[in-house]
């Protein structure tokens, strides 16, 4: 049927009431299975197909979105980046590892914004390059449909965002009211949740928001129930995809989000933190404040907290502000550290930094020596001098814990004076 159309013909003109009727029309013109996805690879409509198909299409239809392994493969092979850069159809060779067969894809665009994608599966027959103008016409027809859907979705999102802000700020505490709102927004309250906050160096632009939406929508590690933007921060309520939910799940999610924002969109220096996992939705405000506190600790102690993403992992860092306040009231000062600082200043040595590094590595001589870029014998000599000058017994666990805490307090006070 495709051969019947000349360059001036447009088989996609007319009023298609639904995406389903439009996708069937596209499939009929190209004689192949077709899917339409939104910008985040969620399935919007698909045509019928014969027994000949591939696993990627079947899994997309079953899961209502493209499998994460397929998306990752398309990025790694630079295919999605290529599709997103052009208005032209792109021919894609099969990727056996993820069950993807030969395809032609085109991005549906409004100016520079990608609204979605059309994917035509070449199973039974190959499409010629002469069909490419028709693909562009199909993309234009789908664009009109997606813009209507986008307007409807925007209105719904505004109501959801307002409700989420009320939860984050503690302005709705009634369990009954919270449950009713979930029902209103057609959401199933998950059994477990945690608030996750990502912080960017710059104010998050509209383009950045689209990139963030993309990553959050395509991840299948966990569910993102709500998400809002607050200048340099994106705040979200997360839940497990399965029954279990652990701090390791959150840590993996945060790490991979940061890595993918860097690899795919060249956005770096993002930090992330999460609050305690809870089952009580009146705890959302507390979980939010905990996530913000994690980010504060990462700023104050970047070398040590770069791998600490959850509030429960912070340990002693949760109490440093309280200890510092008590020390100030009592005019407390660690005389051993004071002596080491005075010695370093007079002799241009690094005993204070050496002690801090040694304790940070839990008295592991080999690791501390590597971090200091010195020989093991040199470290051993320095530790003897530290013990002598500071009158410190490095075999006494009580003294070591006290020194560790007081060293952190020193760093905390330095940050306050910056």
Image (spheres, grey):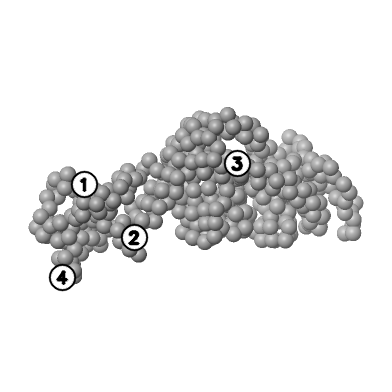
Q: CA distance from mark 1 to mark 3?
A: 45 Å
The numbered dot on residue 163 is 3
Residue at 46% across, 59% down: 269
Q: Is residue 417 visible?
A: yes
Precedes in sequence: disc 4 or disc 1: 4
Question: Which is more foreground, mark 2 or mark 1?
Answer: 2
Mark 4 touches mark 1? (CB < 8 Å): no
Q: Could you tell whether 59 is left or right of 350 in the image? A: right
**Viewer-nearest residue: 288 or 70:** 288
The numbered dot on residue 119 is none
The numbered dot on residue 416 is 2
Where residue 337 appears, as percent x and y from the top left, is 18, 58
Element type at marker 3? helix
Which residue is identified by label 1? 401
Most extreme residue toward the front is 329
Q: Could you tell whether 171 is left or right of 147 in the image? A: left
Q: CA distance from mark 4 to mark 1?
A: 27 Å
Q: CA distance from mark 2 to mark 4?
A: 25 Å
Precedes in sequence: disc 3 or disc 2: 3
Precedes in sequence: disc 3 or disc 4: 3
Label 3 environment density (alpha carbons within 10 Å; few <14, some 14–19, many ≥20) = some
Query: What is the quadrant of the C terminus in the image?
Result: bottom left
Residue at 84% across, 42% down: 17
Element type at marker 4? helix
Which residue is identified by label 4? 346
Residue at 85% across, 45% down: 16
């Amino acid at each position: 049927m495709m051969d019947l159309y000349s360059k001036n013909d447009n088989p996609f003109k007319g009023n298609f009431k639904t995406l389903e009727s439009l996708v069937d029309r596209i499939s009929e013109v190209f004689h192949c299975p077709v899917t339409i996805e939104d910008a985040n690879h969620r399935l919007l409509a698909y045509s019928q197909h014969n027994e000949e198909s591939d696993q990627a299409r079947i899994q997309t239809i079953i899961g209502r979105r493209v499998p994460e392994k397929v998306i990752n493969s398309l990025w790694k092979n630079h295919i999605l980046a290529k599709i997103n850069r052009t208005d032209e159809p792109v021919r894609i060779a099969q990727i056996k590892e993820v069950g993807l067969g030969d395809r032609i894809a085109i991005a549906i665009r409004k100016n520079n914004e990608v609204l979605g994608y059309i994917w035509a599966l070449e199973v039974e027959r190959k499409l010629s390059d002469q069909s490419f103008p028709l693909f562009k016409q199909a993309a234009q027809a789908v664009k009109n449909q997606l813009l209507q859907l986008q307007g409807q979705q925007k209105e719904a999102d505004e109501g959801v965002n307002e409700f989420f802000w009320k939860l984050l700020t503690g302005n709705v505490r009634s369990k009954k009211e919270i449950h009713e709102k979930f029902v209103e927004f057609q959401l199933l309250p998950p059994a477990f949740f945690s608030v996750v906050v990502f912080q960017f160096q710059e104010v998050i632009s509209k383009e950045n928001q689209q990139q963030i939406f993309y990553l959050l929508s395509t991840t299948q590690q966990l569910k993102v129930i709500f998400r809002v933007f607050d200048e340099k921060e994106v705040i979200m309520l997360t839940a497990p995809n399965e029954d279990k939910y652990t701090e390791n799940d959150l840590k993996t999610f945060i790490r991979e989000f940061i890595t993918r924002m860097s690899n795919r969109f060249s956005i770096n220096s993002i930090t992330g933190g999460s609050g305690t996992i809870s089952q009580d939705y009146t705890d959302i405000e507390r979980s939010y404040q905990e996530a913000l506190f994690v980010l504060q600790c990462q700023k104050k102690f970047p070398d040590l907290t770069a791998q600490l993403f959850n509030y429960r992992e912070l340990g002693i860092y949760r109490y440093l502000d309280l200890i510092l306040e008590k020390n100030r009231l009592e005019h407390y000062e660690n005389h051993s550290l004071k002596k080491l600082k005075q010695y370093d200043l007079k002799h241009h040595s690094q005993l204070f930094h050496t002690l801090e590094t040694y304790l940070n590595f839990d008295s592991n001589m080999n690791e501390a020596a590597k971090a200091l870029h010195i020989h093991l014998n040199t470290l051993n000599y320095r530790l003897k001098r530290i013990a002598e000058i500071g009158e410190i017994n490095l075999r006494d666990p009580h003294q070591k814990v006290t020194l560790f805490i007081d060293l952190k307090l020193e760093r905390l006070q330095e940050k306050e004076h910056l």
